[in-house]
Amino acid sequence: MDRRQVLAAGAVGLATAALGGGTAAANVHGEMADALGAMSDGLGAMTDALGAAPTVLDRGIGWTRTRFLIEGDGSPYAVDVVADTGQRPRSLAYLLPGGGLNFTANFFTPRERNLAHHLRRLGHLVIGITPREDLATAAGIGAGRGLAAHRVDARRVIDAVDAALRLPYQLIGHSAGAALALDLAGRGGDRRLERVVVLDTTGPYEGDLAVRAGQARDTFQSLIDQGSYVNDPGLKGLLARALSDPDGASPVPRPVDPTTRFTHAGLAHYALIRTNTLPGPANWIYRQGHAAGTYTFGASPAEDHFTLAHSPLPVWGEATAALGSGLVPHALLRDLCAIWAGDDATYRIAWDRIRAEVVWINMELGRGDHPLGADLIRRNGNRHVTFQVVPGYAHGDPVWGEQADVEVWPLLTPK
């Protein structure tokens, strides 16, 4: 039995066991045979095209998740494939994570209710491309890990899969992954690219914000010139401490009384809700923060009141626990700042060459109402561009929010 038969037989056996045999099992064999055959053939073709052997990471009723580990220059990077075992895929959906995140954290959390499953149920073969830095150490990340390097890695996967499967596809990116999706769309002339979904990111700013972006670009370039190549946001540890020892004292002073310290839970909530007040060259890009919610200081750290509006803290913890290194290359941040500053000399997205449909959705409390990037695509003759802002949501809420499946996800794939 070859690898394609093994994949198909395993999926059929899982579904048969779940349905308890008998007539239901017979129907599974009859109705799912074509879908399972297509899935196993597709994975076999991807194995040949990517030059990597697949590993089945996880499976449930009606789906399977397979990983390819792509070797090459520098650290390897992971490509995850979430396939539906009950229907043939009609198209591909590439999911591109935000800075410091991987596919599991960004799009496969929680395990049973996530954006990957939503797209799978719509008939897409879901392919998540995790950046190399997720499996790297700080010593393995150099000055060359800018947006162009991320584009080259993603393009390798897209071209290989396209040669194997030849299905229409869309690019769906969140945050830095959304900038990557736009960059890919502007560099290639692939006729099978149907849609670019931009989830809470920013094109060029105008006025004072563009100046501020230019200053941030210079800060990151200066760090690179000094031999500092990576940023560690620290979210993994921050959330782990908040969940394991919520009432413990953190080392961070409370701004209302610097003689006192946040609790671990308080600090995590404050950092998520009021991200734009934190130190750092690029936290100002959020209108409020990573998560919608409220934080009210009390007379003491134990009396602070805080709550998240959409994304529960345990979900944030689950997502960050799934991270590898959690590192963000300074070169990537420099290039993003250059895009925000409108600095084409440092990095240019070819807004005039994006011809696929563009669905741009920002969060009111995340990256906010800054439509210039969408406007630039539209001004260059692309009539299929929409831009909208989801009220009350912050940067991470569209992927981890408890109501995101009804309040945000339907917006990503309009009829």
Image (cartoon, rainbow, N blue to C red):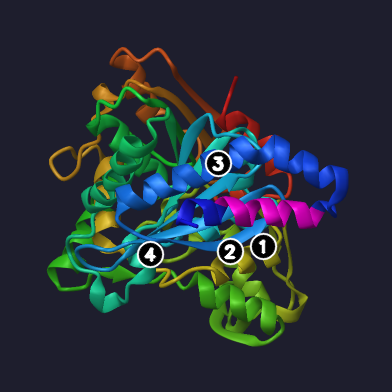
Q: Nearer the viewer, mark 4 or mark 2?
A: 2
The residue under the point 23% across, 59% down is: 145
Q: Nearer the viewer, mark 3 or mark 2?
A: 3
Q: CA distance from mark 1 to mark 2?
A: 6 Å
Instruction: Give how far across and how far down residue 65 sits, in percent.
Output: 56, 55
Contact, CB < 8 Å: mark 1 with mark 3? no
Which range is magenta?
A: 8-18
Q: Is residue 207 visible?
A: no
Q: Foreground residue, 346 or 298?
A: 346
Instruction: Give how far across and how far down residue 193 sits, in percent.
Output: 37, 27
Contact, CB < 8 Å: mark 3 with mark 2? no
Residue 10 included in the magenta stretch of the image:
yes
Contact, CB < 8 Å: mark 1 with mark 2? yes
Instruction: Give how far across and how far down residue 189 sits, in percent.
Output: 25, 25
The residue indicated by pointer 4 is 280
Q: Nearer the viewer, mark 3 or mark 4?
A: 3
Q: CA distance from mark 4 to mark 1?
A: 25 Å
**Which label number is shown at residue 37?**
3
Q: Foreground residue, 314 or 36?
A: 36
Three-letter code for the amino acid on which mark 3 is drawn: Gly
The residue under the point 53% across, 43% down is: 39
**Pointer 2: residues within 10 angstroms few (<14), some, or many (20+)?**
many
Q: Nearer the viewer, mark 1 or mark 3?
A: 3
